[in-house]
Image: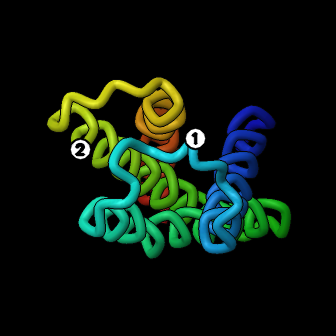
Amino acid sequence: MNKTLRALLWTTDIGFILYWSITWLGLIPKEYLYQDYSNEMLVAWNLSFIPLDLLISLTGLMSIYCFKRHNSSWLTLCILSLSLTFCSGLQAIAFWGIRLDFDLLWWIPNLYLLLYPLFFLPALAKQQRASFRRT
C-alpha cells in the first residue's frame, strides 16, 4: 500500500465518520444541505447510505491496520473498501443526475468517491491475482 492510497483511504474513512456524526448531530448549516432536504424521501435516501459508508470506513481502516501489522488480508479489505467507495459515489451521482440537481457542493465529493478508487483498483486486483497464483 503506497502512501497516497493510505492517505486517501484514511481521509475518506474518517471523512465518512465525521460526515455522519455531523449529520446525526444536525450541525450542517441549512444553506449547505441538499435541495429539498425537508422532503422525507430524500432524507431517507440520504440516511440509507449510512450502512454502506460506515462499512467503507470499517474496511478501509481495517485495511490500513492490517497493512501496518503485515497481515495479508489488508489487500482484500482494501479492494473491498475501494469497490464500495466507488459504488457509494456512483449511486449518489446517478441519483443527483436523474434529478437534474447539479449542486457542486454535493457533486464534487461524490465524484471524488466515484473516481479515486479507479486509480488504485486495477493494480490492487493484479496484485491479488498474483498472490492467488503463489498459493
Residue found 47% across the figure and 71% down from its top: 50
Q: Quadrant of residue 84?
A: bottom left
Residue toward you, 41 or 11: 41
Q: Quadrant of residue 111?
A: top left
Q: Residues within 10 Å of mark 1 (few under 14, many from 20)?
A: few
Q: Is residue 18 left or right of residue 60?
A: right
Q: Is residue 72 visible?
A: no
Residue found 51% across the figure and 43% down from its top: 124
Instruction: Name the amino acid, label 1.
Output: Tyr
**Count of numbered badges drawn on the protein:** 2
Which element carries disc 1, helix, strand or loop? Answer: helix
**Position of residue 82 measured from the top left corner of the image (x, y, whole percent):** 49, 50
Which element carries disc 2, helix, strand or loop? Answer: helix
Q: Is residue 27 left or right of residue 32?
A: right
Mark before the other along the chain sequence, 1 or 2: 1
**Position of residue 41 measured from the top left corner of the image (x, y, whole percent):** 24, 66
The quadrant of the image that shows the N terminus is: top right
Residue toward you, 24 or 37: 37
Whole-angstrom CA distance, mark 1 to mark 2, is 18 Å
Q: Residues within 10 Å of mark 2 (few under 14, many from 20)?
A: few
Residue found 51% across the figure and 58% down from its top: 81
Instruction: Kindly identify which numbered label has been placed on residue 32.
Output: 1
Up-down relation of residue 123 to residue 14 (above or below): above
Instruction: Name the amino acid, label 2.
Output: Phe
Q: Nearer the viewer, mark 1 or mark 2?
A: 1
Q: Is residue 105 left or right of residue 65?
A: left
Residue at label 2?
95
**Position of residue 97 measured from the top left corner of the image (x, y, whole percent):** 22, 32
Up-down relation of residue 125 to residue 50 (above or below): above
